[in-house]
Image: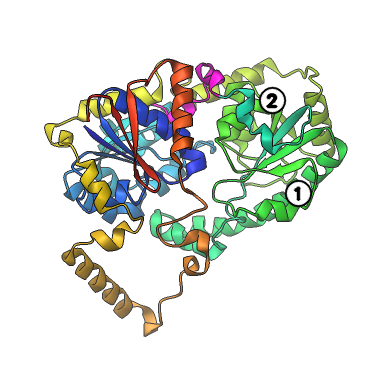
Amino acid sequence: MNIYLPIEIKARELEGRTLLALAAAERGHQVLLGGKEDTLGLSARGILKPGIVHDKSLTPGQLSKLLEIRSYGHMITAQDEEHGLIEESYDSFAKRRFGEETLKTASRLFCWGAHDEAALQRIYSKYAVKFVATGSPRVDLWRPEFDSLFPPESNFSHFLNPRKCYVLISSTFGSILNENPFWVLLERLRRWTNSSEEEEINMYYRAARQYQLLGSFVNAIRRLANTYTDISFVVRPHPKEAVNAWSVLLGDYENIQVIREGGMSSWIRGACALIHNGCTSSFEAAAAGTPVVAYCPIKSDFEHAVPNSIGYKANLEDELIHLIGVISSDNFLNQDPDALAATERLLAGRFSNLKGKFASDRIVDEWERLATPELAEQNDWQQLRQRYKSSDHKAKSLSPISSLRKKMEGLVRATLRPNKQPKPQSHHQNNPNLQKGKNIHKFPYLAEEELQDIINRYQVTLGRFHSVKVERFGLRSFILYRSGSE
């Protein structure tokens, strides 16, 4: 069976999607893993043989793309990589990120756990059978079985000055430190999701709160660096944040590093503590046994209370300084047994694969239940590789009909635009990191050595996947298959 696995944000998805690709290839399926220009793009134009296209979301704004993919005989499954699990209720996220029409196009929607599965089955009861709580391959990596996947040398010690430990600070300021300006993010909310006017207004209030919180974080990190000169403080930018934002905000400190490289799991495993506010990383740190400190200096109705309930909480800067001093000295801090039990219940409800079968294997199980002979016709990868070796697939592969249709759509939009004003220049045209189809800040070039290193570590850690072979397909994509099944 053909499996097409797109990656949107490399730092967030590469390790989990690679594990999923390996699990599928190990069973004899042929997997195309990588950039959307190869996986989604070639699927939506009928270039790839019919297969399962596993997308990262089913937002309403994707409907035309999903319909096009389906029209060429592909089957669609998805798991929302944004997940929405940091809120107490999943309802708002479910209504905003999904829709009746997009759910119609999908054969399965893989849920992270019982929490989102129950909400989706209730809100979209007509499609209840499509929702399956497999868990996420990203959460597979949180489990003890993967501890040896992240040895000390994998924690990018070459980036850090030699000190006794490092404290990881996970940034969640993607809405105000984004490569895109605020108005572009607002426009995307309207275009891609079922957002209400209230949700749009809330974006302004959330941004205002984020600026206040950011100022408190900058000041606190500087003070931590000055107080504990023998500790390194690693600021991990959110994948959507501008590359240089934190370096400019913090200034030059010998023991502060702003590092985007590597998967989050590696950094969490090696840290002596995690500082965050409303971040998914708190779930992973709790599962991995890394001390978690939620820094909450700003009172707000928009606080993400669920992740901030995990571990220790510091409302004042002095409290934060004290907590980091105690934790980094390996002194024992008593935690309320009831709070620990509550955290355990929280994780179990939101993430179904912290125990038992890996999510990566559960998802492949579901794919095999969906299998049809039509999805097994093999691609001629050599021919495709020669034809689409350029990263500019779109311009080369559009059929005359598709090209004409796109031109007509452009003319219709121009005709209907109020006052016939010229179309606003895209922010992407002035930003080399955001040019259409590239999104370099989200998914830079993927080298063979980097992917092979991840695969090698999986093989050693799990004792699996030794039969899987890898070949490059595009600038950011690879074919994975079982030896002898080409």
Q: In this view, does 182 lie to the left or right of 445?
A: right
Q: Where is residue 266 in the image (x, y as percent from the top left)?
A: 58, 30
Query: In the rendered image, which quarter is residue 117 located in?
Result: top left
Residue 436 position by quadrant: bottom left
Question: Secondary structure beneath disc 1?
Answer: helix
User: Residue 472, relative to residue 244: is it above or below?
Assistant: above
- Which residue is the extreme one toward the bottom? 419
Nearer the observer, 455 or 361: 455
Regarding residue 209, the answer to whether it shows in the image is: no
Query: Pointer 2: what residue?
Result: 291
Could you say where residue 213 lies in the image, as x and y percent from the top left? 71, 49
**Span of residues in magenta:** 133-149
Say how the picture is coloured: rainbow
Q: What residue type is labelled 2?
A: Pro
Q: Within 10 angstroms of label 1, few (less than 14), some, or many (20 or more) residues? A: some
From mark 2 to mark 1, how far is it between C-alphas?
21 Å
Label 2 environment density (alpha carbons within 10 Å; few <14, some 14–19, many ≥20): many
Q: Does the magenta stretch include residue 146?
A: yes
Q: Is residue 438 visible?
A: yes
User: Which residue is identified by label 1?
Assistant: 218
